[in-house]
Image: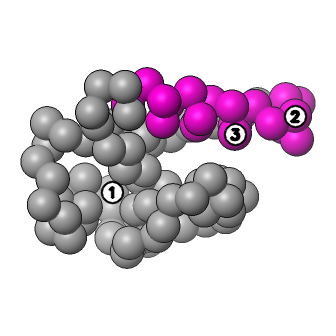
Amino acid sequence: MALWLDKSQDSEAQLAVGARLFVAPEARHEGLGERLMKAANTYARERGLRVVLDVMAKDTAAIRLYECLGMQRIGTSTHAYGVKSRVVV
């Protein structure tokens, strides 16, 4: 969230942060992740919020989905617990 706040004019109160969305392996390739993200975006938009996603850089399928849904990568940051990097879209 800090990366987004540094690059935008938004306040914390204007954000809906999406993190750690998982679809069980047996349920993948059925459009479930896309439907979940569209529902989250609709929910946030109806409340005047901007969705910001915190995604681990290794989760390339998730990043690809988010970018296909029109989200843009704004940068990467280092996680405090040893994960090399995260992508914020």
Mark closest to the chain's N terminus, 1 or 2? 2
Looking at the picture, how far across and down is residue 13, in whole percent?
14, 36
Tag 2: Cα neighbours inside 10 Å, few (<14), some, or many (≥20)? Answer: few
Quick check: can you spot residue 4?
A: yes
- Answer whether residue 42 is magenta in the image: yes
Look at label 3 and name its amino acid.
Glu
Q: CA distance from mark 1 to mark 2?
A: 33 Å
Residue assigned mark 2: 30
Name which residue lies at 43% across and 50% down. 53
Residue assigned mark 1: 81
Mark closest to the chain's N terminus, 1 or 3? 3
Say which of marks 1 and 3 sits in front. Answer: 3
Look at label 2 and name its amino acid.
Glu
Looking at the picture, how far across and down is residue 4, in whole percent?
25, 61
* Nearer-the-camera pick, 59 or 43: 43
Asked whether disc 1 touches disc 3, contact meaning CB atoms under 8 Å apart, the reply is no
Above/below status of 9 relative to 73: above
Look at label 1 and name its amino acid.
Tyr
Location of residue 21 (image quadrant): top right
Name which residue lies at 69% across and 31% down. 35
* Nearer-the-camera pick, 50 or 18: 50
Task: Name the element at disc 3.
Answer: helix
Residue assigned mark 3: 34
